[in-house]
Image: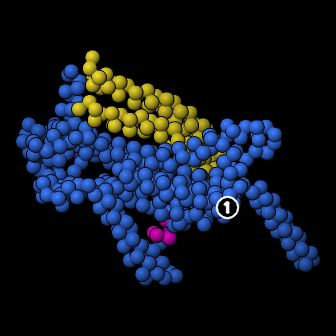
Amino acid sequence: MFFLAETSHFADKAHAAAEAAHHAVEHAEHAEHASHGSPHVVNWVTLLAKAMGDTPLAHALEKYEKVIFSLIIVSLISLFCFAVNRKRSLVPTKLQLVLENIVLMLDGLVASVIGPKGRAYTPFVGSLFIYILVSNLFGLVPLQNSATAYITTTAPLAIAVFFYVQWIGLSKNGFFGYIYHLAGSPKDFFGYVLIPLNLPLHILGEFSKPVSLMFRLYGNVMAGHILVAVFLGLGLQMLKPTGLPVGVPLHFPFLFLEILVSLIQAFVFSLLTTVYIAAMLPHDDHEHEHGAGHGHGAKHGAAHAEVHAH
Amino acid sequence: MTPESILALSLPLSLGLAAVGSALGLGKAVAAAMEATARQPEASGKILVNMMAGCALIEALTIYALIVVFVLMGKIG
């Protein structure tokens, strides 16, 4: 059972080592505290809880760790936006320009997937993007943690997306249009014959969307944190013989990978939300005709102008 | 062979197998996107967005395997 002993031993070691990195003190008894079996980097909430010992407040801190970080992130975003928006002007300041560009980028993303009418959904999708991105990046700050590294944060986000998408489907298509959409939008006899197959499949698909959303975000962020913690532990193991509370920063290259993953996952979550909304909206084929009509009108206008010029 | 040792042997293998399939899919998707970008560089933004959505769906399968591994890792003890 060499392999077995090695894995548990390694998990404990990595946990203990990661703790020492920030704490500079190693508690042998806390090394056994890694009951989840996966190493993680300590943050100030768990440190505070550990310092308090076995009190009810410490247990509450450990229990509500994710909520605390979630609240910190939300208040950071709100404070930043409030501070920038307080002195709004037509000639933007630097920070106002930053915010305006972020909003413009998100608006462009949503409009490129749904079309010009999709701008109504930018606030929801944009809020998701900003919250997830800040939360993901927050975990890379020493002594802080990501709220999105826990399934208890990503599940509500995905459930909110699920209900929002269903509500859009119901309100835009009407009740029977919604059922028609779920039945696979049958157009001919063959389509109606396949309804018993299509309806359950589509309903199952609707429920699998939020599940895949929440597991993707949670898995990526959590795996990134564990990766960093493992390499932090390895780096500390290398310099253990010296007895100093320092290590080789082996995890450093992975921080850049984490920044990339944070961006991509926030982008993917909001992009998939947009795609789900776009799939729920009624498909109108008149848009191209309208565009063509406008082009025609413009041409006519140009011709008229020419006539007038003559 | 105890159940724990079976788990310890099979968990990394399962993750590796999931990664193989995911890697094949990702390779195909990215290769097609690269080709499309080379053919039509002005459409690179749209291609990138679509590729990302596809890649996320492919990658999710490996992430499921990873979560299963982490859930079952607690049983190895």
User: Badge 1 local density, few (<14 within 10 Å), some, or many (20+)?
Assistant: some
| Residue A109 visible in the picture | no
Residue A27 place in picture, x, y as percent: 10, 45
Location of mark 1 (residue): A172
Could you tell me which residue is drawn at 35 percent across and 34 percent down? B69
Query: In the visual, does A175 lie left or right of A229?
Result: right
Which of the 4 image quarters holds residue A86? bottom left
Among the chains pictured, the one given yellow colouring is B
- Which quadrant is home to the C terminus of chain A? bottom right
Q: Is residue B73 magenta?
A: no
> Which percent across, then down, holds residue A14?
20, 39
Q: Chain of mark 1?
A: A
- Residue at image location 62% in from the left, 41% down from the top: A200
What shade does chain A have? Answer: blue
- Number of residue marks: 1
- Please, what secondary structure does the residue beneath circle 1 have? helix
Q: What residue is at 62 percent from the left and 44 percent from the top?
A: A202
Extent of the magenta region:
A98-102
Task: Tell me where residue A48 sits by quadrant.
Answer: bottom left
Q: Main secondary structure of the magenta part?
A: helix
Q: Is residue A195 left or right of residue A30?
A: right
Question: Is A79 situated left or right of A107 in this image?
Answer: left
Toward the top, the furthest residue is: B1
Question: Where does residue A5 sit, x and y in percent of width and height?
Answer: 19, 27
Provide residue A192's location: percent of width, then percent of height: 76, 41
What is the basis of the colouring in this image?
by chain
Camera-side residue of A82 and A51: A51
Rendered residue at 76%/37% (across/down): A193
Instruction: Please give left or right for residue A136 compared with residue A177 in the image.
Output: left
Asked whether residue A77 appears in the rendered view, the answer is yes
